[in-house]
């Protein structure tokens, strides 16, 4: 079973700003909020959920920084903080889990736009071209 090309377990693509991770940072950022809340609620120790949250933020920032830069990663961290606060504010109206899932989805979209999305190669049409 030799096809001439070596097989790898994880394929890493390269984007305009550097290598793309196998799992998008957007997925990990959203999971960070969900898992941190689950740990806090499941153990009854909010501080433990906070530790999970901080660890997830550091991990996501560390892996996105080389390809995205400080400004984009900082914007994602700020968005994550806003989502964290929003989940607490929305919990009274929506319930705890629905609010966490909603803000996790918002964080995922924002993270994808800021650090995971790669610019298209086609781009907008040039001026003067028909």
Image (cartoon, rainbow, N blue to C red):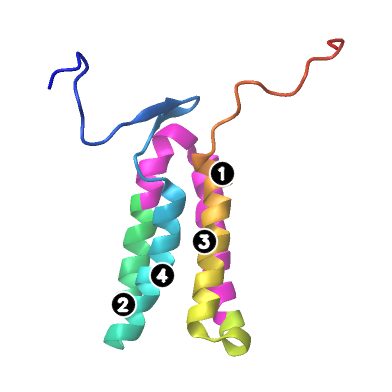
Residue lying at the far front of the rendered structure? 1
Q: Residue at x 30, y 32 (%)?
A: 11
- Where residue 20 appears, as percent x and y from the top left, is 40, 34
Mark 4 surroundings within 10 Å by alpha-carbon count, few (fewer than 14), some (14 through 19), many (20 or more): some
Q: Is residue 38 left or right of residue 71?
A: left
N-terminal of the pair, mark 2 or mark 4, is: 4
Front residue of this view, candidates 87 and 11:
11
Magenta-colored stretch includes residue 77: yes
Alpha-carbon span between mark 4 and mark 3: 12 Å
N-terminal of the pair, mark 2 or mark 1, is: 2
- Residue 29 sits above or below residue 38 on the image: above
- Where residue 39 appears, as percent x and y from the top left, is 31, 77
Residue extent of the magenta highlight: 60-88
Magenta-colored stretch includes residue 35: no
The residue beneath circle 4 is 34
Residue lying at the far left of the rendered structure? 1
Labelled disc at residue 39: 2
The residue beneath circle 3 is 80
């Amino acid at each position: 079973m030799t096809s001439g090309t070596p097989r790898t377990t994880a394929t890493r693509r390269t984007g305009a700003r550097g290598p793309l991770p196998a799992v998008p940072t957007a997925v990990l950022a959203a999971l960070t909020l969900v898992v941190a809340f689950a740990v806090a609620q499941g153990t009854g120790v909010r501080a433990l959920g906070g530790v999970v949250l901080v660890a997830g933020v550091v991990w996501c920032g560390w892996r996105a920084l080389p390809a995205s830069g400080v400004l984009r990663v900082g914007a994602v961290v700020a968005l994550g903080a806003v989502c964290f606060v929003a989940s607490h504010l929305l919990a009274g109206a929506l319930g705890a889990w629905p609010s966490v899932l909603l803000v996790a989805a918002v964080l995922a979209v924002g993270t994808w736009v800021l650090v995971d999305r790669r610019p298209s190669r086609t781009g907008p049409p040039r001026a003067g071209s028909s």
